[in-house]
Image (cartoon, grey):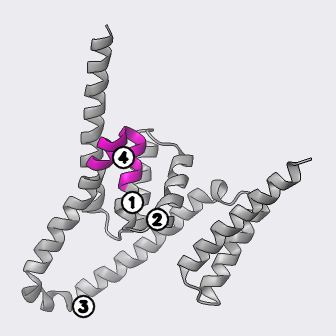
Amino acid sequence: MNSAISHYSEIIASRRNWILFFGYVKITGVVIGGGYAIIAAAQEEFAHRRKWLSEDDILEMITVTQTVPGILACNSAIYIGWRINKFAGALCALFGAILPSLIIIVAIAAAIGAMSHFIDNEYVQGAFRGVIAGIVGLVIVTALKMRKKALVGAFGRLIAIGCLIGMCVFKVNPAWLIVASIALGIVKVAFKYAEKRP
């Protein structure tokens, strides 16, 4: 009985690995715009459609992938793969995220000489402008979906407003804003525990 359950669990795990691989091949092969656009597509695929992740998992993923070095798409693939099926899931999702980009970049590099006239074409430039505008929309939708869980209380709202002002008005590097936000979060927790002590 135990061997049958173990065998069935292995089949499910293997199936999930393939779904992670092909899911990320589809996402990174079709979704143009990188990072946030891919996160929005991954959220739709693995949280909304397959119900393998919760909205809290997605919020945690955005936090973690933003605060560690590396490519956002690859970081999100590793995180989602790990949450769904540990090391094997992370590896499959990562390979799925890398493969389409690798193929496309190699093809572009091989044909770059012939493509220079094509890239300067007004219609191609117009298409790029349309894609960029679409990416802004995807980022806004992702932010709006996350706002209820991300902006908890007055503290969360103040951090968000401070970062917005820091970037837009004072042109502060986003890395410094993230570091400052982490520090303020730690200070808030320290004060909370200090108040509870007798």
Is 146 on the left or on the right of 130, as rendered?
Answer: right
Across and down, in percent, residue 37 comes to 40, 65
Q: Nearer the viewer, residue 90 or 99?
A: 90
Across and down, in percent, residue 182 comes to 63, 66
**Residue on which the image places disc 4:** 81
Tell me the amino acid under the disc marked 3.
Glu
Residue drawn at x 30%, y 56% as measured from the top left: 27
Residue 13 quadrant: top left
Q: Is residue 75 magenta?
A: no
The region drawn magenta spans: 77-92
**Residue on which the image places disc 2:** 68
Tell me the amino acid under the disc marked 2.
Val
Measured along the vertical axis of the image, is residue 62 above or below residue 53?
Answer: below
Mark toward the viewer: 3 or 1: 1
Q: Quadrant of the N terminus?
A: top left
Measured along the vertical axis of the image, is residue 34 above or below residue 130?
Answer: above
Q: What's the distance in space between the residues labelled 4 and 1, CA to CA?
A: 10 Å
**Residue on which the image places disc 3:** 122
Looking at marks 3 and 1 on the same chain, the residue that comes earlier in the sequence is marked by 1
Looking at marks 2 and 3 on the same chain, the residue that comes earlier in the sequence is marked by 2
Is disc 4 surrounded by few (<14), some (14 to 19) or many (20+) residues within 10 Å? many
Across and down, in percent, residue 116 comes to 14, 90
**Residue on which the image places disc 1:** 75
